[in-house]
Every structure is written in structure tokens, then in C-alpha cells.
Amino acid sequence: MLLSLLRQAELGPHERTRSMWLGDPFREGPAGDPGHVHALVQTARRMTAGGDTDLALNLLLAGAYRCHWADLYGNPAQEILLGTDEVAAVCYDPRLPQIQAYAAPIRRGAAVTGHLTAADPSAEPDALYRLGSAACLAGDFGRASSLLGASAVLLRQQGRLRLLAQVLETRAWAALLTADFAVAMPSAEESARLAAETAQPLWQSAALIAQAALAALRGEEAPVEKLTSEAERVALPVGATALLALGQYARGLLALGQGRHADAYDHLRRLSEHGDPASHHLIHCVAIGDLAEAAMRSGHRSQAVTALRQVEPLTAQTPAPYFQVATRYARALLADDEAGFTDALRQDMTLWPFFRARLQLAFGEWLRRQRRSAASRAPLRAARDAFDALGVAPWAERARQELRAAGESSQQRSPHALEQLTPQELQIVQLAAEGLSNREIGQRLYLSRRTIESHLYRVFPKLGVTSRGQLPRLLRSGTAHPAGQLGGTTGPRARSGR
């Protein structure tokens, strides 16, 4: 509304330029309009020549956002990079790696990584966010989560909810893709809530799809469809291809976990089909291992081989660890022989437990199909135990089914008490375990003290604890007493909350 009024007023050239930046994203046409990116870049280059590099960077960042959201990785992205290089020749700013990561996350992956190596962990929250988001898009999810976590702490202290919503959404995806679900779940939930409160529909939609992907890993079909459909209602009219692609990724994960490989293939192949509104080259690279698994089990091996050959030259340009692991996983599946699996499993995958467990499951399945049931049990057992530890029940059940077919019974896992908690309840428990009072937790999460008390009153019986002092040990050990086993009342202790 204010921008509309400003445009009706008589503005000078500099003010018109600032309104051009403030009017983005997507208020000046659909996300995929290369003409608008061109206009942003040309205006930014004039600002750079005139010495206003700050406004130039903001304009370039607006254009880079469009490149990512709409998958404009051709000439528009190249224009953004040329404009960014002109600014980089005269100054350094943390927006530079962020712009490169949004416009060309793979092609400029090595340059982004170079910026991250020199990152100052004590920097201002804005700089930490820019570097963290650059790391996330470039595939360095572990470093991204660390930088974004540090940014979130400072933004909470400053009460900057709008940027905090963006930080938490990005961190949710970084944590999800490294199987750090204890961080991903509360980050996605809080981001969706804050983005709604601060009127950021695109960021809210991205957080909803992160929640959908987490639900997919747990095999929860109804939430996956509800959350992705809700996000798509925002993404489709503005051409936010990245969100549509992530929605298909979440649906593909759900189908994979349930063993519906043909359905998974139908979802994931859309990420690379020219003209499909969900086609996105970066997310296609992220999902190449998932596509290979779906294709191998649904009679589409040749299509997956072609897709991998297209992706490998791209991922070879970046040192990002995720892309190396994903392509290695795809190669092992498509090789379909013992050497492919054993070579992949020899690699250090400590930071990628979900991928390693999936490799072990696939290897065990392959051995059983070769009528080597006895040999298949060890990798299947390891996969089952890892899936249980991660809490991804559909994958664990697949491993159990394979073990039964290989002649070994497998006891059903009892759900962990912490798994009964909602993302917000888990976040409150984590903060209470750190020693924060109810008032301090409320201030941290922008909730009332009474709301925190109410949550803890309900949570203690679920966890089978009677005092806050028991929470740190429960979280460290990964075990909890069955609800109510310890007896006693939980209400007064939960309310007292120091």
C-alpha cells in the first residue's frame, strides 16, 4: 500500500531505484520474468558506477532471489554474476556470497565456500544469515546450520522476527538434509508461525514444505498432502518454482519410505522435466540419489542413468559435501553390483547417517536378491538400527521386512517418548533442559509465560518425568520412562518453572 502511494508521488531517480528494490520480490510481475531481472541488474550497475554499492547489492540480491525461486539459471543468472563481480572489485560485503549462491549455487559453489572458510562466528546476525543461507544453497548444510543457529540467537535478542523467520526456515532445511531432526522440526514449526505473523507468504510456504518433508520421513501421509497443497496455493500463481519442486521432493520422500517406488519416480522426475512448473535444476541435483532409488525399483534405470550423467558435470564444479554424497549414492544404486555398494560404504559418511543407512538397506536388498540371505542380514540389521535411531519409521519397517525375508526376526521398536511431542513442545523441552525459566522460554519464543506453563504441564506426563531437572539427562541419554511410570504429579513442578 505504501509503495503504491510512493509510486504515485514525484520521486527522484534515487528514490525510484530504492522503491524498485523495496517492491520486490514478485510485486513487479511473476518470479520467472527475465526482463525484470535484467532491469534490476542494469539499475544496479548504474548504482555501482555512481558509488552506491549498498543499493546495488540490494538490487542484485532481489534479482538473485528471482533466479533461485524461478530457476532462472541461464542468461539472467549470468547477468547477476557480472553485476556482482563489478561490486566485488571495489568492496567486500556478506551479500556477495549470498547473491552468488542464489543465482548460481553450483557454478559459484567453490567461490561461496571460500567466503565461508573466512566467516567470523562473532559477526552481526545479518552477516551470519547471509553466509548461512549461502552455505545452505551451496550444499554445505553442516556449516549452514551452525551459522544460522548463531544468527537466530542474536536476532531473538534483538526482537527481529521478520528476519528470524527466514533464518529458521533456511536452518530447518539444512538440518533436515543432514538428518538433524531435533533442530529441523522446531525450526520449521517456528518459522511457519513467525512468517505468518510477519506477512511473508513465500517463506511461510517454504517452512510448511519443510514440515511436510519431515512428516514424509515419518510416513505421515495426510500432513504431507495438506502442507504441500497449502504451500502450492501460494507458489503456483507467482511462479515460485523452487517451492513447487520442494513439494514434489517431499511427496517423493513419502512414497520412497512407503516402498511406492513408481509413485516416487513420478514425483521426482518432474524436477528435471523441461516445462514442468516444478522443474528446478538445483533441487534436481539435491534429489538425484532419491530419483536413482525410485527409478531402479520402478523399471526406469535408463532414465536415471541419463539424469545422473546430466547432474555429475554440475556437481563436479562444487566442493559441497552433500552433492558428492548424493551422486555417490546414485552411482552405487545404478551400478547394481557388490563393488558399487562396498566402495560407497567405505567412504566416510559420519555426517550423513540417513544416506549411509539407505545404502546399507539397498545393499542388503541386493544381496538377498542374489540369494545371499545370510550375508544380507548384517547390512540390513545396521540399516534398521540406524533408521530406528533417526526415528524414520517407514524406512525402519522396510529394513525389518527385508530381514524377515532373509530369515531373521526383528523386534518392533517402541516409540521414544520424545517422539510424542509436537515440534513446539520439543523446543520448549530443549530450552527447559538448558535451565531457562518459563519466562525466559516465553521471551525466547515470543510466547506468553502462561502458554509455556501449559505446554510443560502437558509434556511432563508424556515424558514420564516429574521435574525439570530430569530433562537434561533424558535428552542426553535418548531414553525416557514410559509416561506416568514414575508416578506423582507433574503440574506444580511444571508451573513453578524457576
Image (tube, rainbow, N blue to C red):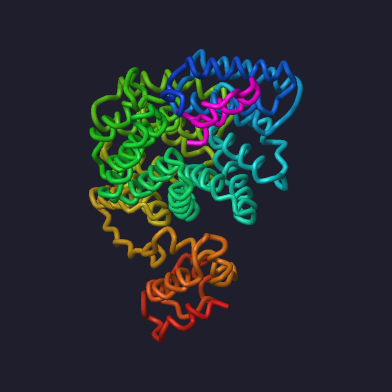
Residue ID at (32%, 42%):
230
The percent coordinates of residue 264 (x first, y second) are: 28, 35
- Magenta stretch secondary structure, dominant: helix
- Residue 391 shown in magenta: no
Residue ID at (70%, 31%):
93
- Residue 2 shown in magenta: yes
172 or 305: which is nearer to us? 172
The percent coordinates of residue 181 (x first, y second) are: 45, 52
Q: Is residue 332 left or right of residue 7?
A: left
Quadrant for the C terminus in the image: bottom right
Q: Is residue 111 visible to the viewer in this orientation of the structure?
A: no
The percent coordinates of residue 252 (x first, y second) are: 31, 37
Residue ID at (39%, 45%):
208
> Which residues make up the magenta segment?
1-26
Q: Is residue 69 left or right of residue 50?
A: left
The percent coordinates of residue 65 (x first, y second) are: 52, 28
* Residue with the most extreme top position: 75
238 or 463: which is nearer to us? 238
69 or 245: which is nearer to us? 69
